[in-house]
């Protein structure tokens, strides 16, 4: 069922435009990433807003590569963006565009501005331009080249294009107002000379338009109605409007919203690139990365990410969203959908001494208590089993109710077992095996005499276990704000050194030996796991932990609280 979105300030603006017929009833948005990195969860918010609004208003949304800055852009990034937006579940049909395809048109618009006396070629270098610009409290000074004739400007601009001048020696600037209270309006640079290979236009151009010039023209060319972007562009809006007005071109409405900030996460492409280049993570799709490819590899679903974006809403107020909100959104979804299975991550052998040797039986287990239609399955049981090492303590601390010498517990869906003996490694003293007796009358996990046990453990039959690797992922940064680093250090100092734990000897319920790549399961008591397709392609079965279960203690505590009321 399609979700009905709550209104927000962007939708109110659009509703107003529909009422006043400003755009002839059309709604046409775009998502314009710069292909200089992989998309992250912040981009997901922008995608959900622009594509989501288009969908809800029966409008259109374009995907546009904002590839006007050749230094940092690459085809790899273009490909990843296409893959990620599609994975998130949005469709641009045939409307994928590249700002670089407009270079010729953008150039013509620049010529037109010159013809109108609204742009000029300036010979000041970068430092001089900055110096002439003035400050918030001091007006700028006019460039000495500001009053060149139209003919001279046309000639110089053409020669800029033809490669007659060295890099950075000339710029094309808008002729606006060097005393404007908006510093962006103090004759901003529109074009610069830069001999740089472009991933699409190759070496055709040695001049490139600046973002502010290219972006509004691209929006205008595509007939965008609402150009939705993040708040840092609010300052640029007067320039966006000035350029399109000066050209008398079709004029979209720019609307800004607050970007997503997430706790324990960095969302700057520069920093993410640094993590990848310095091999602090395994790549852009490392399951600890906040990139869409990282979340995909971790096992997140597109719908969980879309629901998260819906839930956090849209506003003009900057805020930091707790990473727990995102984790809850995948947890909630998988709690409903993911089938259950048993897996032992740090195995400890259990031998049931009164269970006949060579015997095996199949016990009924519930596939999903949240979804009765998921039915039941058979789980093999035998004399030798594995339980979680931490579910046994030779000397139980207070409030430890799980297995220990003399104590009886329930094996989920199986029997009550009681620990009678332990075997230790004579050298290290480590417990290597636990011996138990079982009560055949408790088959299925219920005691006919009403006898109670305080703990239920998960287990896997040793003879049937599927061996696999499990990777436990934790937060990549241990600080809520990773940028808060000691003097002289940066966000990298806050990397959580325990963010990945690889467990190579896990014992899984046999059904997990042939589930397909991309399967998601709840491993009882342990969390939600995903069979990593990338590792599987390389011949290795690796289950990634997507997210932990809700903290067991917190859940028990809230149950207790409920009982009391
Ligand atoms: P950089 O980190 O280099 O500034 P960027 O993350 O802004 O780059 P773009 O490719 O320019 O990258 O972003 C594409 C679109 O996504 C822009 O409209 C931008 O406003 C939006 N966007 C980027 N980061 C966020 C974020 N954290 N939350 C919401 N939207 C974002
Ligand atoms: Mg940006």
Image: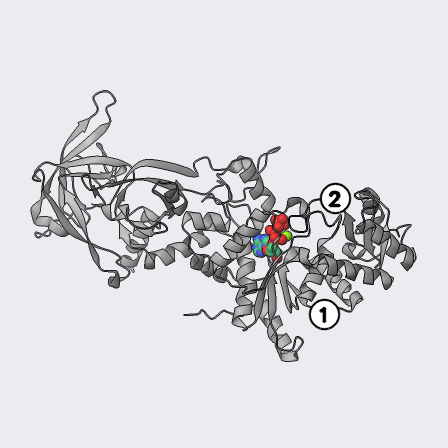
| Residue bearing the label numbered 1 | 250
Depth check, front residue: 466 or 160? 160
Q: Which is in the foreground here, disc 1 or disc 2?
A: 2
- Disc 1 element: loop
Q: Is residue 124 visible?
A: yes
As drawn, is 290 to the left or to the right of 563? right
Depth check, front residue: 373 or 541? 541
Q: Is mark 2 within 8 Å of ligand 1?
A: no
- Disc 2 element: loop
As drawn, is 557 to the left or to the right of 307? left
Instruction: Name which of mark 1 and mark 2 comes first in the sequence.
Output: 2
The residue depicted at 9 percent of the width and 42 percent of the height is: 359
- 102 above or below 265? below
Where, quadrant-wise, is the C terminus in this rendering? bottom left
Percent across and percent down for residue 390 are: 27, 37
Percent across and percent down for residue 462 are: 19, 39
The residue depicted at 81 percent of the width and 42 percent of the height is: 166
Which mark, by number, is residue 195?
Answer: 2
- 134 above or below 374? above
Q: CA distance from mark 1 to mark 2?
A: 31 Å
Disc 1: CA contacts within 10 A as few (<14), some (14-19) or many (>=20) = some
Percent across and percent down for residue 433 are: 19, 31
The residue depicted at 67 percent of the width and 58 percent of the height is: 101
As drawn, is 252 to the left or to the right of 277? right
Percent across and percent down for residue 131 are: 83, 45
Depth check, front residue: 406 or 26? 26
State the count of labels. 2
Where, quadrant-wise, is the N terminus in this rendering? bottom left
- 503 above or below 510? above
């Amino acid at each position: 069922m399609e979700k009905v979105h709550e209104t927000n300030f962007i939708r109110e603006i659009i509703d107003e435009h529909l009422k006043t017929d400003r755009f002839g009833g059309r709604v046409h948005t775009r998502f314009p990433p710069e292909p200089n990195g992989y998309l992250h969860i912040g981009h997901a918010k922008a995608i959900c807003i622009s594509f989501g609004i288009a969908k809800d208003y029966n409008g259109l949304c374009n995907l546009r590569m904002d590839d006007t800055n050749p230094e940092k852009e690459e085809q790899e990034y273009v490909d990843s963006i296409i893959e990620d937006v599609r994975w998130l579940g949005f469709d641009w049909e045939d409307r994928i565009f590249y700002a670089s395809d407009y270079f010729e048109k953008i150039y013509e618009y620049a010529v037109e501005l010159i013809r109108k006396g609204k742009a000029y070629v300036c010979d000041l270098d970068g430092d001089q331009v900055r110096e002439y610009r003035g400050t918030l409290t001091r007006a700028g000074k006019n460039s000495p080249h500001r009053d060149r004739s139209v003919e001279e400007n046309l000639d110089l601009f053409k020669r800029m294009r033809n490669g007659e001048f060295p890099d950075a020696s000339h710029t094309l600037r808008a002729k606006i107002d060097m005393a404007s209270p908006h510093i962006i309006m103090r004759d901003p640079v529109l074009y610069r000379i830069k001999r740089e290979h472009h991933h699409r236009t190759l070496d055709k151009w040695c001049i490139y338009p600046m973002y502010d010039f290219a972006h509004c023209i691209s929006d205008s060319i595509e007939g965008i109605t609402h150009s939705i972007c993040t708040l840092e562009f609010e300052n640029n809006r007067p320039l966006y409007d000035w350029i399109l007005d000066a050209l008398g071109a079709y004029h979209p409405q720019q609307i800004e919203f607050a970007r997503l900030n997430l706790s324990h996460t960095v969302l700057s492409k520069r920093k993410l690139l640094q993590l990848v280049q310095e091999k602090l993570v395994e790549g852009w799709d490392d399951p600890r990365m906040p990139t869409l490819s990282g979340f995909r590899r971790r096992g997140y679903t597109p719908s969980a990410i879309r629901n998260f974006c819906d839930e956090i809403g849209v506003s003009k107020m900057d805020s930091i969203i707790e990473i727990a909100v995102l984790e809850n959104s995948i947890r909630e979804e998988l709690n409903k959908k993911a089938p259950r299975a048993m897996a032992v991550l740090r195995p400890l052998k259990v031998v049931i001494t009164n269970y006949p040797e060579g015997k095996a039986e199949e016990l009924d287990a519930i596939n999903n208590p949240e979804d009765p239609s998921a039915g039941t399955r058979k789980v093999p049981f035998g004399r030798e089993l594995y339980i979680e090492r931490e579910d046994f303590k030779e000397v139980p601390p207070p409030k430890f109710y799980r297995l220990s010498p003399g104590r009886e517990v329930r094996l989920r869906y199986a029997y009550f077992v009681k620990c009678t003996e332990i075997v230790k490694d004579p050298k290290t003293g480590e417990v290597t095996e636990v011996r138990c007796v079982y009560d055949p009358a408790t088959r299925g996990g219920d005691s006919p005499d009403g006898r109670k046990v305080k703990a239920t453990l998960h287990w896997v039959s040793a003879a049937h276990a599927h061996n696999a690797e499990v990777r436990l992922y934790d937060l990549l940064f241990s600080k809520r704000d990773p940028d808060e680093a000691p003097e002289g250090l940066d966000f990298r100092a806050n990397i959580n050194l325990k963010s990945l734990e690889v467990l190579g000897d896990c014992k899984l319920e046999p059904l997990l030996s042939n589930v397909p790549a991309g399967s998601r399961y709840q491993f009882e008591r342990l969390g939600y796991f995903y069979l990593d397709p990338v590792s599987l392609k390389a011949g290795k079965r690796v289950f990634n932990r997507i997210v932990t279960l809700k903290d067991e203690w917190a859940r028990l505590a809230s149950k207790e609280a409920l009982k009391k009321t």
